[in-house]
Image (cartoon, coloured by chain):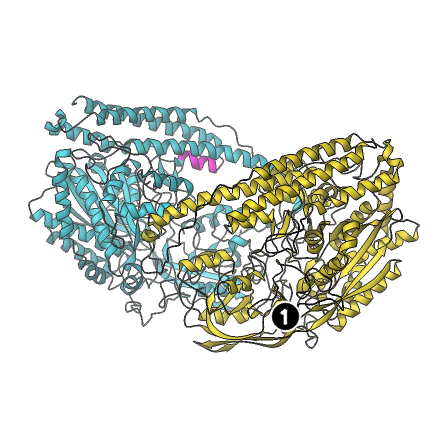
Chain colours: A cyan, B yellow
């Protein structure tokens, strides 16, 4: 489901690291040592990787992509199951121990959809994406899911229409200034600005009774480029389907939070399921939106609210009234995860997990199959290696998830079902999703930043024949902020993004506390097929990655990561970049409070001094905002002290590690190595708490979470940051203590891990 | 012709000042002393101003506006002359010594206009603004000037079309990167980004053979608000007429640069006139532009080039070919300036000049008549004061300029004709133009900054019943940059904008070296009638200033300025704000060179390191830019030393002045006061040089000029700043010396003026 937004920049992180063993360098090396490997094993590992590369064949990718995208394959469809079985057969043929794990999840589909403008004019929205002669799968009308938002409420409402821009809390503050209340109204929001599920949630919180979401051509249509089928971009009929479950509360089946949605699982009733949207929601095309938006009267929308339709955007309410009816079949549908293992020969209880979903909203060639076929190719390569006699030290698990689109169903239910094993065995999860032409991009746990940098140094960009790392660095030099440019110039490791949500890494990282990565290529393959019937083989091979070169690059990247993680002497976590980013986040939240304090003082003064009132145009409605409570000084000391403790323990650990070399006694003690692995792979778990985040106990990671009001966008130190943003000062002070304790616990565990290094030095 | 762009902020300046006499305050006082007046005369002056206010009658404004805008009144039209005679009769009736001064200027009008898309489709542009039932003067088709750009070349060209965004030099650098050359092509540019005359000039410099300029609805149309006649904004047929003479070279009649275009003046031939455009140019509506822009192929335009038409903006060239034919009657037309005087009773050779043009492109209700009727009201008020026995100390001259629209013809020719008298007698020129609802806004000579602040403290905002100064300050508090907010918070004087061009202040300030101001109200009266047939009485009274309250506010403001300037004991120039802004400008140009040096180094490194090449998408044409010569270190020392000298002399002068009081001997010596006036009013002349600016000797002011490539936008320290921008390092070093000498000469003259103060202390 990841919406392909490559901010151009995004790779990885700024502090250097040596390899786990005996390296001392301020930059992760391109060649030479490999993180986690003894020097003496480097050549062997590089040879293995070359062999792996030689087994990869670009020609498989279009064949599999065509096969998997030949028919609509959403959750519950015949072809969804068919694809799962096909993927299963492939993994089996390559020698994996593979099976399908099935879950039963709530997956509503539309029974009735109606959207009408009832005044001042009448108009009935088509709610249809027409087949195109240029796109051979676009005419599979009987199998396509209609355009809808999954987990919308049933509803039949008629009310005045209000335009709410992106529908974020800030947008409602703007409406307040215009004296516009959405209570009892239907809102129309454009896609973008936040994850789609945020829009109806915030609308509901403000009293709206229905929500329409449309794709504005400014953000997703002709303003971006020629539209399909002439070009890659969304045409006037294209609709973005998608889930509107309240996923920032929990992902997975709405009826089984925290437990696997197995056949006999205890399920919530629909009314108990907190992630179901409370009002009817419907996504529409800009063709359908135009008559609605054109009919709205009231104040002209602020300039940054205006899209690219040839109209004056007004806020409403007024003359424009719409009738919205949306009724659903509230069915439980089977979800088929394909789980394929290669058991570890030395440390079978350390799991290196690699995943990509296989379900699509319709034909899903780009999202998710472009990533899926790359992971299949990795699987094929590993299978070939097995045939040469290679055996991974650690267990490798390839997962093809089902039900990602409605809400990370397959991955979440699998993680919840296997929670206990994962707690003990989960080492690293590597995710991908749609993949395209361009630059490498990664987000994830910052302990893996040097590892990722090193891998991408060893993958060649297919267009420019330099390393993928080099090209990403060049992108930073050209388009980066001053800070990003400086870092790129220094040659230091490129930064990993912090992960929010939007794909299957979420249950691993944020619910199970397993170090995770999300990887992919993109940036040169724009387009607007996302979640429409036009996300097809035809569209993909014309506009996204016609030569499949970047599909192969992803196989080389993901496969290399799996190989290194599976075979390293010690898991290649490096802790310095992590303590550095946490120190940075701590400064950010401190500054956030300071900035809010200053902003509140300024704003209150403007209000109290009547500045707003005296400037406002008397011919326009303007409601002066209310003053806000002043921002108190929070006690950040526990956090600051904990960060110091963390930094100290990281420094000590890395120092101890650097004093080791190939001759260290440790290498003659497999047990000791396993203990070290065990200790370092538990470190990510040490960032979780049993009580979880405020108001959403399913999310237990104290460093990374999707934002309550961003949905996909990350909030780092979420407990603290969101309490401040929501002006809940008491909670903020409490959360500072929670995070501080977590970091101190982490530092303590790292000290114990260090003891393991020392005792064998 | 001023395009109403209120950047919301713009008032006046940051250093405080005392009155010329015996004040010592860091803020120009709201009440109490009046700059230039002895304390003992304050009450009398305030009484006079109250009386003046009481003579003003809002009811006159709509009557005159309706009468003057009743028919099209462009240069050479019967109604233009009729209006001039009407204005003359008014001033005469009020007791002014008034006459019409006539000049004969080149004013081409269209003979033939044709614009056709010839491939891939065919389409003929309408080039018409249709009459509207809702606008009673819009049907005066036979008297309306067709839509055209004055001083376009005759031409008949057919060529491929290239979209050039705003058509500024920076836009052509972007085209270069896409490998697009406009040589032999016709360019289509949207209005905005720079003055319209810049677009064909830069197009010609790049080899284009024709230029089309259209109003994009993003900047000027439905994106801004509802279109006319429903709302105030430009509809799909509205066209912006306007001059495309190369006015940054000189303003006024193209055939008589530097001399008055009197009947017998020696005239250049058309081919000798450097300000005439070299290629045919035609302005069109967005309705006419849509089929042209839609037909363009080639690369998609960069995101910030895209307007609000419902298309994908492409750059071209390619399939799209157009035929442009524009032929003109190259006639000499009479220009009628109305000049109305009240002779000064004590110092008749000191002229306080107040002007606003009267010609319009069509009916011109907003531009310029909204300002014109306010100046007429001032004239009426002064006439009433005359009847009460009041006589101004200094001579007051009210001017209603003709021919401003084609190129400041009336004002420039008048200034050139009276150059010698103005050199001796010109004290201050106060300009206005279109006026609307909102906040006060002023630009001008910074020696007048405290004066302007003080006046606006004494005018009441009609909507909010606070001073116009207070409201403008509140606007700064709400919308200003951090620096502007801080200044507003401090309560110090608000800043005057530096003046570029775009209205009749240019010949006074930048050619004759007379301290000048440009004043007006606006910011709440948006709309898109500019230079179209829809700039009508009907449009104005619906959308711009329906109650004429801000017309009256302008009369109170302009009239009060004239009264104070005419009656002050000593002209109220204060030099501290001027030396402060010059010191700021000196820092800016130094930083400009430093920033360009850094930017050039960075850019050259990106080029030499192949970063551009390695990042570029290989499926798109991308031409790596050429490296540029490194930026040398310039010798700014002469400028820095001159600024120090200036600051010292200003400090001394202001100190000397502050030591004076009502009892100072000076007040018993009218001769001495005249000498001081004479000295301070010559100070602005001291900022001019005989050789003028590089390549444009008509512009002689070394501090303020319109930019060679901005047109209206100001360039401060233009000789230095533009040499640097154009990478002419030798010239930049020379110009630093020129400006330094000018400032030192200025400091020397100020020392002499100070001696006059001292000798009478």
**Most foreground residue, B717 or A211:** B717
Q: Which residues are the magenta region?
A: A719-728
Residue at point 11%, 40% (across, down): A44
Regarding residue A492, the answer to whether it shows in the image is yes
Residue B664: percent from left, percent from top: 85, 31
- Kindly indicate the quadrant of the structure image that contains residue B618: bottom left
Residue B41 horizontal side relative to residue A695, left or right: right
Q: Which residue is mark 1?
A: B270
**Residue A105 in magenta?**
no
Q: Which subunit holds the residue at mark 1?
A: B
Within the image, what quadrant is residue A694 found in? top left
Q: Is residue A545 above or below residue A624?
A: below
Relative horizontal placement of residue A513, taking residue A244 as reference (left or right): left
Question: Looking at the image, which is closer to me, B721 or A460?
Answer: B721
Q: Quadrant of residue A585?
A: top left
The residue lying at 48 percent from left, 38 percent from top is A726
Residue A756: where, in percent of width, then height? 19, 24
Q: Nearer the viewer, residue A435 or B174?
A: B174
Front in this rendered view, residue A12 or B702: B702
């Amino acid at each position: 489901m990841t919406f392909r937004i490559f901010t151009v920049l995004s790779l990885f992180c700024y502090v250097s690291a040596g390899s786990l063993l005996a390296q001392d360098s301020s930059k992760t090396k391109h060649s030479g040592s490999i993180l986690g490997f003894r020097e003496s094993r480097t050549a062997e590992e590089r040879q293995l990787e070359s062999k792996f590369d030689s087994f990869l064949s670009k020609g498989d990718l279009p064949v599999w992509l065509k096969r998997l995208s030949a028919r609509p394959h959403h959750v519950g469809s015949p072809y969804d199951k068919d694809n799962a079985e096909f993927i299963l057969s492939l993994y089996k043929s390559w020698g994996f121990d593979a099976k399908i794990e099935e879950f039963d999840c709530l997956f509503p589909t539309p029974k009735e959809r109606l959207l009408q403008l009832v005044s001042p004019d009448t108009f009935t929205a088509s709610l249809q994406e027409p087949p195109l002669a240029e796109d051979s799968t676009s005419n599979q009308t009987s199998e396509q899911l209609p355009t809808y938002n999954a987990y919308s409420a049933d509803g039949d409402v008629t009310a005045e229409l209000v335009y709410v821009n992106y529908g974020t809390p800030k947008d409602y503050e703007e409406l307040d200034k215009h004296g516009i209340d959405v209570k009892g109204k239907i809102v129309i929001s454009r896609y973008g600005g936040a994850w789609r599920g945020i829009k109806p949630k915030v609308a509901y919180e403000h009293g709206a009774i229905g929500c329409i979401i449309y794709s504005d051509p400014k953000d997703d249509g002709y303003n971006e480029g020629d539209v399909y089928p002439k070009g890659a971009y969304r045409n006037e009929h294209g609709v973005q389907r998608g889930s509107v479950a309240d996923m920032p509360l929990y992902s997975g089946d709405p009826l089984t939070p925290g437990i696997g949605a197995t056949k006999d699982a205890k399920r919530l009733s629909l009314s108990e399921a907190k992630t179901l949207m409370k009002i009817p929601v419907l996504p529409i095309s800009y063709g359908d939106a135009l008559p609605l938006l054109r009919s709205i009267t009231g104040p002209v929308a602020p300039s940054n609210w205006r899209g690219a339709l040839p109209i004056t955007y007004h806020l409403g309410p007024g003359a424009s009234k719409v009738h919205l009816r949306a009724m659903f079949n509230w069915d439980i549908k089977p979800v088929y995860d394909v789980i394929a293992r290669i058991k570890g020969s030395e440390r079978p209880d350390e799991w290196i997990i690699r995943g990509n979903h296989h379900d699509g909203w319709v034909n899903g060639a780009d999202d998710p199959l472009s990533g899926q076929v790359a992971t299949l190719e990795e699987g094929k390569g590993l299978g070939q290696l097995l045939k040469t006699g290679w055996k991974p030290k650690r267990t490798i698990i390839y997962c093809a998830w089902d039900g990602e689109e409605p809400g990370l169903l397959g991955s979440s239910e699998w993680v919840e079902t296997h929670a206990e094993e994962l707690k003990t065995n989960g080492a690293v999860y590597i995710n991908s999703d749609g993949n395209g032409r361009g630059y490498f991009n990664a987000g994830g746990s910052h302990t893996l930043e040097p590892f990722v940098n090193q891998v991408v140094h060893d993958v060649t960009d297919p267009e420019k024949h330099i390393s993928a790392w080099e090209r990403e660095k060049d992108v930073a030099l050209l388009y980066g902020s001053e800070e990003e440019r400086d870092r790129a110039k220094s040659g230091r490791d490129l930064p990993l993004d912090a992960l929010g949500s939007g794909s299957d890494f979420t249950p691993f990282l944020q619910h199970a506390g397993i170090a995770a990565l999300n990887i992919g290529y993109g940036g040169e393959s724009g387009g607007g097929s996302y979640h429409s019937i036009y996300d097809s083989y035809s569209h993909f091979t014309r506009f996204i990655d016609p030569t499949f070169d970047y599909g192969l690059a992803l196989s080389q990247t993901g496969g290399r990561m799996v190989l290194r993680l599976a075979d390293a002497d010690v898991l290649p976590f490096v802790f310095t970049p992590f303590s550095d980013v946490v120190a940075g986040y701590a400064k950010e939240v401190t500054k956030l409070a300071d900035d809010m304090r200053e902003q509140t003082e300024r704003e209150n003064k403007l209000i109290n001094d009547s500045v707003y009132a005296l400037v406002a145009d008397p011919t326009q409605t303007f409601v002066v905002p209310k003053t806000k409570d002043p921002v108190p000084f929070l006690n950040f000391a526990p956090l600051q002290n904990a960060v110091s403790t963390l930094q100290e323990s990281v420094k000590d650990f890395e120092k101890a590690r650097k004093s080791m070399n190939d001759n260290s006694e440790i290498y003659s003690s497999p047990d000791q190595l396993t203990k070290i692995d065990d200790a370092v792979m538990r470190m990510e778990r040490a960032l979780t708490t049993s009580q979880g985040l405020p108001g959403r106990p399913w999310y237990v990671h104290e460093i990374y979470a999707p934002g309550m009001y961003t949905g996909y966008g990350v909030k780092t130190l979420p407990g603290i940051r969101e309490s401040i943003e929501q002006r809940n000062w008491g909670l903020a002070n409490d959360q500072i203590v929670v995070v501080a304790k977590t970091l101190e616990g982490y530092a303590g565990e790292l000290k114990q891990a260090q003891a393991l290094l020392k005792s064998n030095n």
